[in-house]
Image (cartoon, rainbow, N blue to C red):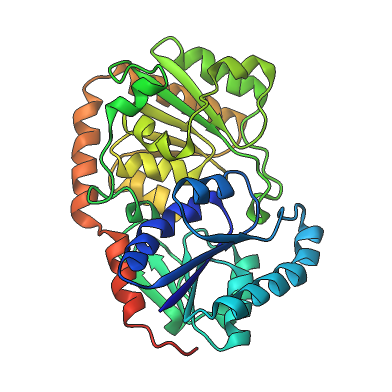
Amino acid sequence: MNLLFDIGHPAHVHLFRCFAVEMQAEGHDILFTCRDKDLTLRLLDEYGLPYVSFGKPKTGMVNKLLGLWRFNRDLLQAARRFRPDVLLSHGSIYAAHVAALIGKPHISFEDTGNMEQILLYKPFTKAILVSDSFTKHFGKRTVVYPGYHELAYLHPRRFRPDPDVLKQYGIDPAEKIILLRFVSWNATHDFQHAGISPQLKRRAVDTFSRYGRVLITSEKELSEEFKPYQIRINPVDIFHVMAHCKLVFGESATMASEAAVLGVPAIYIDSTSRDYTQEQEKKYGLVFNYSEAPAEIEKAIVRGEEILTTPTLEASFAAGHRQLLADKIDVTDFLKSFVLKMPRRA
């Protein structure tokens, strides 16, 4: 079987990599296609995954629409050379359109509910895989599974934290680490989002620095005042750092969910939130969701301070983590079973 994975964001490399490597080991051929966004190419190189890059992604709504034709064309050419039996993605409009053009099934994961994308890929998609935490369904195309994307690569079967990795970067695994994550806000669903202001970022850094070592990871260039806190690390090692954190705080839903499945409390700042981070708060007590309103961010910083100064909360987080892992599945195993049963025609 030939499997083509179209990647729209670095997180999608993680989503599919364990499955792709297992299938490759069993004799199937794999190919990743992508745009040169953030760390995507570096991750593909680090994991030794075969790929074709179509250049830089477009930014801005108008440019994204204009780029639709170009990336569809490039992906179609790559697909004709590779001859995939199945195309997989996380909501890729390009993969859906090309799958229809070559008469092959497209399987999409979905967890954000960005209707501007879904309306363009849904008609050309065989199956849309959604977590049982997701509140939107798409008729007969919907396949529900009990899990989160992050359990495709951070399930205990897939990942074990290694404290020696931290030591390579001069980090003591025993110290209290607080990881801050800032995003670029360039995705289509980020339109009219402001995120955390520089003033409130400074407030968070100053507050959390009283209780441990603050590390910052950011999609965009940091201002000079925050660069001393920036963690410069091989991106494949970041999960080892996260697993040893006392708190993950920031604007990334993915990293908040990654923290939760690792048993680390997370504070997520985004006015739209996500179904899965809401479940991880209400059901497991591992994520705390706040909007981008300055007053809400102030509350989020106070909550972070409470987490860092209340040792008795650790037992609650541990219990929530155990329950999460009991309720949810190894998503890579689920995907493998699903794809192997998939008819090879659209």
> Toward the viewer: 174 or 208?
174
Residue at image coords 61%, 37%: 219
Residue 279 left/right relative to 214: left
Residue 21 to residue 288: above or below: below
Residue 341 left/right relative to 140: left
Residue at image coords 60%, 38%: 183
Residue 97 to residue 56: above or below: below
Residue at image coords 67%, 44%: 193
Residue 117 at least partly seen: yes
> Toward the viewer: 177 or 283?
177
Q: Position of residue 292 (x, y in %)?
A: 59, 37
> Toward the viewer: 327 or 254?
254
Quarter holding residue 322: top left
Q: Position of residue 27 (x, y in %)?
A: 34, 72
> Toward the viewer: 116 or 74?
74
Quarter holding residue 317: top left
Residue 306 at least partly seen: no
